[in-house]
Amino acid sequence: MAKARTSPDPWLIAATMAILAIGLVMVYSASAVLSFREFGDSFYYLKRQAIFAGLGIAAMIVTMNTDYWVWKKVARAALIVCFALLVIVLIPGVGVIRGGARSWLGIGSLGIQPSEFMKLGMIMFLAKLLSEERRDITSFGRGLLPALGLMGLAFGMIMLQPDLGTGVVLVGASMMIIFAAGARLSHLGVLALVGVAGFVALIAAAPYRLKRITAFLDPWSDPLGAGYQSIQSLFAIGPGGLAGLGLGRSLQKYSYLPEPQTDFIFSILAEETGFIGGGLLIVLFMLLVWRGMRTAITAPDSFGSLLAIGIVGMVAVQVIINVGVVIGMFPVTGITLPLVSYGGSSLTLMLTALGVLFNISRYAR
């Protein structure tokens, strides 16, 4: 491949940095009360988020300046490591349980979430697998089945933690790669039916998931239990109106909305900055997705194209589900808002992945 490298897409970088800056401001605003009550330091979560943002930006600079086809060479090894981490995290006494899921490796408040690594590892490997010339994606047995098998295995291991939200994001991004690679619509239609049946089975197998579904349909049926988060989220968004109550003036962050700096940070943003602030953030995400898809379409080879689609898909699926949960369109799933919600592994890995996307944009036609 000719190395006619240019500057990265400035719109991609600008959108990413703007969203990250908004995230840092909102992490402080949403967590200041909780931070002071728990740690005696209003800046506790902000300082940690800033450290992870710095590490993520450093990793982003490295991946932005690393030719993206390098990841094709290491994709197999990276996926093996990701599967190994998913096995290790399930070992009792090794994996750390947080929020009812054994999905962390580490000590105390410091740790990594292997499922976050798996999302990027799976995207890289599927892009490599489905970009190989001998791979006929229109053939169910030779092309589609191996990709589905790997995706299904990863999803199953993540569900053993259990972590439905991360599993859904992994499947969503993977299916976007498979679709873009040229899979038959008839095959995908059958898979969609199987997926719906499997999703229903997963819900039926776990009573707490069923409660989340019923709470989603009617949160007031259990206002102090399964419907509590949805109700409090809407109580935050409603008073925000057009321009919001003002930055730092949220009422729901005063112990009404649990963990306001993570999954429901968009609720606090909408309460404090209103429709204007929430709309601006969504426009920035749309800009990032649009320029990312443009990069995928104009990438010089199929590997770069599929890799870009997977990274953009990972961002888009997370944003759609997170915002959908916050405004009551989807059941509560525990998915963070990319680049905005508090979280070390998710923030660092997302910036690393976007660095890869920036590098692909340097070769776009």
Image (spheres, grey):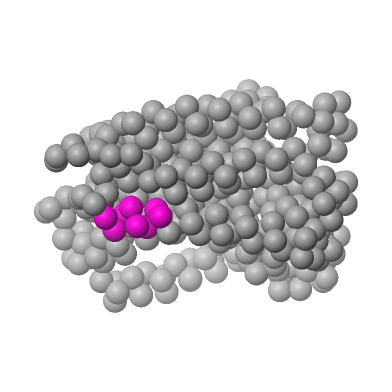
Please say if 25 is above or below 134.
above
Along the horizontal axis of the image, is 80 left or right of 140? right
Residue 295 drawn at (x, y percent): 33, 53
The residue under the point 20% across, 39% down is 4
Q: Which quadrant of the figure contains the N terminus?
A: top left
Q: Tell me if residue 236 can be seen.
A: yes
Residue 43 drawn at (x, y percent): 77, 29
Is 177 inside the magenta-drawn segment? no
Along the horizontal axis of the image, is 347 left or right of 267? left
The residue under the point 69% across, 27% down is 47
Please say if 142 is above or below 344.
below
The picture quadrant where one finds residue 234 is bottom right
Looking at the picture, tell me which residue is in the foreground, 122 or 181: 181
Identify the magenta region.
291-299
Residue 165 drawn at (x, y percent): 56, 53
Along the horizontal axis of the image, is 125 left or right of 215? left
The picture quadrant where one finds residue 329 is bottom right
Q: Tell me if residue 126 can be seen.
A: no
Looking at the picture, tell me which residue is in the foreground, 349 or 196: 349
Query: Looking at this rendering, what residue extends furthest in the left direction?
Result: 134
The residue under the point 77% across, 65% down is 242
Looking at the picture, tell me which residue is in the foreground, 12 or 167: 12
Along the horizontal axis of the image, is 75 left or right of 164? left
Residue 19 drawn at (x, y percent): 58, 46
Please say if 152 is above or below 360.
below
